[in-house]
Amino acid sequence: MGQNVAFFLWDCLQYLINGISQGSLYALVALGYTMVYGIIRLVNFAHGEFLMIGAMCGYYALQAHLPMPVAILVAMLSAGLLAVVVERLVYRPIRKSGRIPALITAIGTSLFFQYFGQLTFGADPKTIPPFITEKIYNFGEVNVSNVQLAIFVITMLVLAFLWWLTHFTKIGKAMRATSYNLQAAELMGINTNKIISFTFFLGAALAGLGGMLMGYTMSVEPMMGMNLGIKAFVAAVVGGIGVIPGAALGGFIIGIAENLVAGLYKSSFRDGVSFFILILILLIKPSGLLGKNTKEKV
Amino acid sequence: MSLILELKNTNTHYGAIHAVKNINLFVETGEIVTLLGSNGAGKTTTLHTISGLQTASSGEICFKGIAIHKLPAHKITALGLAQSPEGRQIFANLSIKENLEMGAYLRRDKAGIADDLKYVYSMFPKLLDREHQLAQTLSGGEQQMLAIARAFMSKPELLLLDEPSLGIAPILVSTIFKAIKEINQRGMSILLVEQNAYLALNISHRAYVLTNGEISLQGKAADLLNNSEIKKAYLGQ
């Protein structure tokens, strides 16, 4: 009996560790959703496709025998540049048309790139090797791989970088100002279109990074952005969309919950649990865990 | 005297609404000019048309002799025209100091920025006390001070102020109007939109009255203070 409890606890710890690693990846992707939403109140459903295109470009960079760090850079840059072009050509012209047209446009853009991916890259899944040679360490009954650790550390570094950017640099403060009040930011002389482009670039580049880190657990294929994108979007909403630490918190919660449920109960409930949490949060605190209810002072 | 701002036959439409009708208006360098009018007369729209938040449908707007009516707002700010917008519109999620830094966003002269920061803090000591707090913690009057200070930080040649006394305790109103007068004496031209006609006319050189989007009356502030129409409509006499 005592032994069973011990095994159960070891299992829980293992799923927790797996969940933190997977949650880190959700967090990386969720950051892009949350930053873009924060600045122009647009749910960018094409965000997952930026990730996919980035990962595809990274895959071809590896095929061309470029080293892994360069391939990661290629993935980040191509996702980022694609996002800038899409924002300029697709989202900017309809920015003042209201939220529903923007939402439908985003869904259309997402579909466009899914089929564009099938046309150009083919529908067959492609594999990316782990970004570092995998080593597994045993702690009692628990296994931790250096890849899992590295993913967590990279995510933490990205979060620290974003904190530094938004609080200690001019462009970062301008991003916060623009997200709070675009019109007033424009009056300060801030070129808000540039700030929006930069935000799209940054968010998509992080998705590209996520796509490459993810390559070792899941294959790269044109539909990958949809599955992952929805999870990351759920993470962003659970944490409080528009709030950067919220995206990280949401990512970890979804990642951990999925792994615990899949490991301890049934793996077919893996996807179900994320949406269960989403519905629960929307019922209890619609603005998300760290989201603020906006109120205006008179 | 040279003209710093000139509106020639300017029209602005909000969709189907013709909000500003054929306005001719000017501000001379060094002046405080007040724009009076009742709610919905088109005062804020006029300011927005000048600062570029709203596009003029026809006519011409010149700032320092440069046509600005087709420029985006941030380029107009870069030319030296700042606006403290209606309802203050401070960045509540930024600290007070960060708000002021955003005001100085386009400036590169660090020493000059530091001097101006000291100056606005001397005008509004409350802002210095709470420098590192989020702007959302300020009272309405303090937020108004911050909005004016923030616009001042861009070191504009012309400052547009939209309703600086709206919804503010009387004691703070006098602080704010003293500051406006002082800023003007340092050489900044000011175009003021105000509902408190008595206070505004007292510190202004000239004034315009807007009625239904048209200029119905204009003249020296001192003359308008004694104008019977103004007295009846705006001064409650």
Image (cartoon, coloured by chain):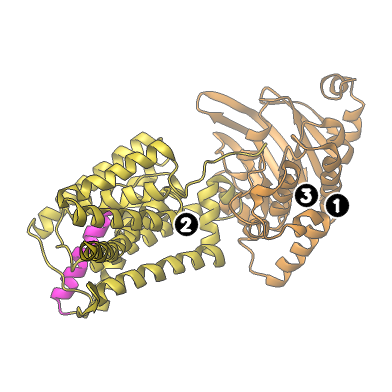
Chain colours: A yellow, B orange
Report the quarter where the C terminus of chain A lies: top right
Residue occupying image coordinates x 79% and y 37%: B34
Q: Chain of mark 3?
A: B
Residue occupying image coordinates x 38% and y 39%: A282
Query: Which numbered dot is residue B182?
Result: 1
x%, y% of residue B202? 89, 37
Question: Which one is in front, A99 or A88?
Answer: A99
Q: Is residue A84 visible?
A: no
Compared to A31, does B49 lie above or below? Answer: above
User: Secondary structure under badge 3?
Assistant: strand
Question: Which one is in front, B77 or A255?
Answer: A255
x%, y% of residue B101? 64, 61
x%, y% of residue A253? 34, 54
The number of callouts visible is: 3
Q: Which residue is tagged 3? A: B189
Magenta span main SS: helix
x%, y% of residue A123? 8, 55
User: Secondary structure under badge 2?
Assistant: helix
Query: Which numbered dot is residue B13?
Result: none
The disc, 1 or 3, on the residue closer to the chain's N-terminal end is 1
Q: CA distance from mark 2 to mark 1?
A: 35 Å
